[in-house]
Amino acid sequence: MSINKEKRRLKIRKSIRSKISGTKERPRVSIFKSNKAVYAQIIDDMSGNTMVSCSSVEIKKFGKNNIESSKKVGLKLAEKAKKKGIKEVLFDRSGYLYHGNIKSFAEGAREGGLIF
């Protein structure tokens, strides 16, 4: 029985989500990447609300899902989070490997002032 990439990622994602849950004091940063864009949001799992969100579409980087735009999304998300008074977060990589776009996003968010 072969497991394709998407099923493998969803399995890892489920495992990660069973271990972490965002609270009001320390919400969860969730990231999703498509072929065209990178999307990120800060979520309070206790109330089920998205507190802050950002995407590469917002930053006007259409058609390119590269490391540079991922870093800008991380910086922008951190900037928006600071305005809402969010400093510490949990990082949910959604089953993606921690390299490339995901690593770049995390570095950008850390540079912007988020602690995780």
Image (cartoon, grey):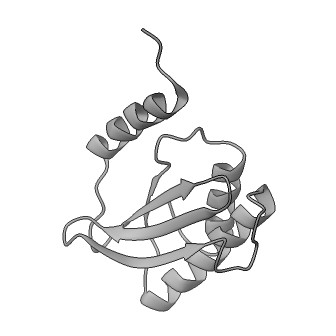
Residue 52 percent coordinates (x, y):
44, 79
Q: Left of 87 or right of it: where is 11?
A: left
33 is higher (above) or lower (below) than 14: below
Q: Quadrant of residue 29?
A: bottom left
Question: What residue is shown at x 35% (from left), y 69% (from top)?
Answer: 43
Residue depicted at x 48% and y 76%: 53
- Above or below 62: residue 91: above
- Tally of numbered tags: 0
| The quarter of the displayed image where residue 56 is located | bottom right
Camera-side residue of 28 and 14: 14
Q: Nearer the viewer, residue 53 or 111?
A: 53
Q: Residue at x 28, y 55 (%)?
A: 21
**Viewport quadrant of the N terminus:** top left
Q: Residue at x 47, y 76 (%)?
A: 87
101 sits to left or right of 52: right
Q: Position of residue 108 (x, y in %)?
A: 68, 66
Task: Give the residue furthest to the left.
Answer: 47
- Residue toward you, 68 or 115: 68
Image coordinates of residue 47 in percent, x first then y, are 19, 72
Residue at the far top: name it: 1
- Residue nearest the observer in this picture, 36 or 38: 36
Image height of 113 relative to 7, above or below: below
Q: Position of residue 93 (x, y in %)?
A: 50, 49
Q: Give the side of residue 105 with respect to residue 9, left or right.
A: right
* Residue most extreme to the bottom: 83
